[in-house]
Amino acid sequence: MPEAESNRPSAWNVPDFRPELAFPQLTEDMVERLRSYGREENFPADVTLFARGERQVDMFVVLDGEVRISLPTSDGETKTIAHHRRFDFSGELNLLNSQGSLVDAHTVVESRLLRIPRNQLQRLMRAEGDIANLITQATIWRRIGILGESAGGILLMGHADDAEMTELHRFLIRNSYPHRIVEVPMGEGAQLDDGLSDVQPTLPAVVLSDGRTLHRPTIAELADELGITELPDPETIYDVVVVGAGPAGLAAAVYAASEGLCTLVIEGTAPGGQAGTSSKIENYLGFPTGISGQRLASRAQLQALKFGVRFAISRDVVTVESIGGIHRLTLAGGISVCTRSVVIASGAQYRKLSVENYGQFENHGIYYAATAMESLLCRDKEVIVVGGGNSAGQAAVFLSGIAKHVHHVVRGKSLANTMSQYLISRIESSSRITLYTDSEIVKLEGGLSLEHVTWVSRGSGGLTAKPIGSVFVMIGAEPNSGWLFGAVKLDKKGFILTGGTEGFEMTPYATSVPGMFAVGDVRSNSIKRVASAVGEGSVVISDVHRYLADHRNHFAVEPRSALAALRSASGTTAPQPATP
Ligand SMILES: Cc1cc2nc3c(=O)[nH]c(=O)nc-3n(C[C@H](O)[C@H](O)[C@H](O)COP(=O)(O)OP(=O)(O)OC[C@H]3O[C@@H](n4cnc5c(N)ncnc54)[C@H](O)[C@@H]3O)c2cc1C
């Protein structure tokens, strides 16, 4: 068997898996270049190079010998998933982020390896474009392989209809974290013969790969345990902190880091924002057959990681204060971060219907996204989609391929002014979608989850009532700007005012506070589209550069006093300026 093939894991039966991309071999020239980033080390046989759960593991290039990569299984055994031989390298997605290792690595025989420490890896990813692309590609495909393994990852157990369970599940999916689900039937706890049934009273529970169980963890607790979040360094003054990892924030992060700025992204939930909840984005340039929002977001996050962006996921920014050119952002839980500039990309969130019992059925029949995950809940059942915009249209079309029938309820008299023509045509031509214009939902009924829905035709007053358990509400969004109240100027609806107004810097994205910029859906008068959010996120970085150049001139000798002022407000120690 040729060398390049021998390390391919036979076990990875993921559809369309590309072993040649997951396990590329470095060339002799590449290995020579890599030597300046690492050191050669000799290891005897059967030495652990890194173990599952370890964070910030180094990368190893095999010069001579062999390294075995194995995945611990739920029954306490290990499964070999790859062998690295001459000029192969170790690591998967966790090489680029701070997640704990999902696998163990051991030498099989006496081996000579090139160890590339993490800090050098970042330098290499910036300087060696061809090798960086090879590594990035391999890390994605290796993670795809691990995600497809039934053996590894963590175990999430709970009741299928439980809102907390749904939230944890969504969090794991959106952060591409390998997991398995054990659904526990309502009222049945002692049926499981896996020794875990005693956790029933505190479901949902997460059984970690080291055997520990977290009962009803919050998203932040789970994220910290899994290393999904990288807590920001309180000692650093970042060049730019991006708040929100939707399309606008991810674009800003990629451009900022690729241009050498020390960049941190703070995201409350998961990369992707609203776009991450879209089943298929069909109008984003370059994807003629469409791309799921989740996929677009994962790719963008990888691109950002490649350039050295740090991500603090799972905590919202709750306040911001600015003194003398330094901005301090405080995250939920009290951690604070200092930065010279801020790009606000906190987007918007779904609007809700004003119907009695509405809150009772959120995540128990009322959903705001129609992705593959939600579609599992309504296979061959009748569903309702509410809203006249493009997101509602996409949801109706997507669900019509899965649900028995889609009832599309719209308040407006037609879709013409609010939806793209291609979607209107598809809705009109589908026998599995019925459109109810000038109509609204008036009653929601059910027990633990939604069971019956009634809507009214506003013109005739006629009521339609159906035994339906899934309603997809897609009626627009409100800005995520509550945390900025009193800090920057907002318009009447709470969107951030930017540029061009009297008293503002004359750049389109400058807010009323120097050094703070706003892009994407949260910005007043922005076009609410993925492409425009991405465009604004990329363009704003040139404004940030200009601002930082001035800022360094004006404040270079003064950041200490600005920090002292911020410090005296909180009693914390002074952060250190970052070295880009
Ligand atoms: C279901 C759906 C389908 C769509 N389909 C399309 C489409 O096909 N084509 C198209 O062009 N547009 C589409 N859109 C619109 C598009 O997704 C948005 O315009 C775009 O996502 C806006 O990007 P953004 O980065 O500005 O904000 P968002 O995508 O809203 O991202 C903001 C991010 O900031 C985070 N955040 C908020 N507050 C805080 C805080 N205080 N601290 C930390 N993080 C915070 C949020 O968790 C979120 O991840 C769709 C929208 C939806 C909901």
Image (cartoon, rainbow, N blue to C red):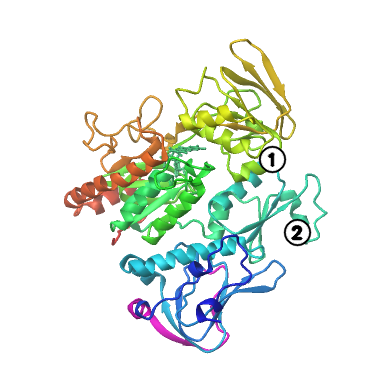
User: x and y percent of residue 349 in the render?
Assistant: 49, 35
Q: Nearer the viewer, residue 155 or 35?
A: 35
Q: Residue at x 71, y 21 (%)?
A: 465
Residue 238, can we see it? no
Q: Amino acid at mark 2?
A: Leu
Numbered circle sitting on residue 379: 1
Which of the two residues, 200 or 470, is positioned nearer the viewer here?
470
Picture coordinates of residue 77, whole percent (x, y):
69, 73
Quarter of the render that holds ligand 1: top left
Which residue was labeled with disc 2? 196
Query: In the depicted view, which residue is nearer to us: 259 or 12?
Result: 12
Going 39% across and 61% down the picture, which residue do you hit?
A: 306
Question: Among all residues in the image, which is located at the extreme right?
Answer: 191
Tag 1: amino acid: Arg
Secondary structure type for disc 1: loop
Q: Which mark is residue 369?
A: none
Dot 1 alpha-carbon crowd within 10 angstroms: few under 14, some 14 to 19, many 20 or more? some
Q: Is residue 90 visible?
A: yes
Instruction: Looking at this view, name the residue that lies furthest to the top.
Output: 460
Range of residues picked out in magenta: 31-54
Residue 541 coordinates in the image, percent (x, y)? 28, 48
Label 2 secondary element: loop
How packed mark 2 is, by other alpha carbons closer than 10 Å (few <14, some 14-19, many 20 or more), is some
Q: Looking at the image, is 39 positioned above or below residue 331?
A: below
Q: Residue at x 41, y 70 (%)?
A: 118
Q: Is mark 1 within 8 Å of ligand 1?
A: no
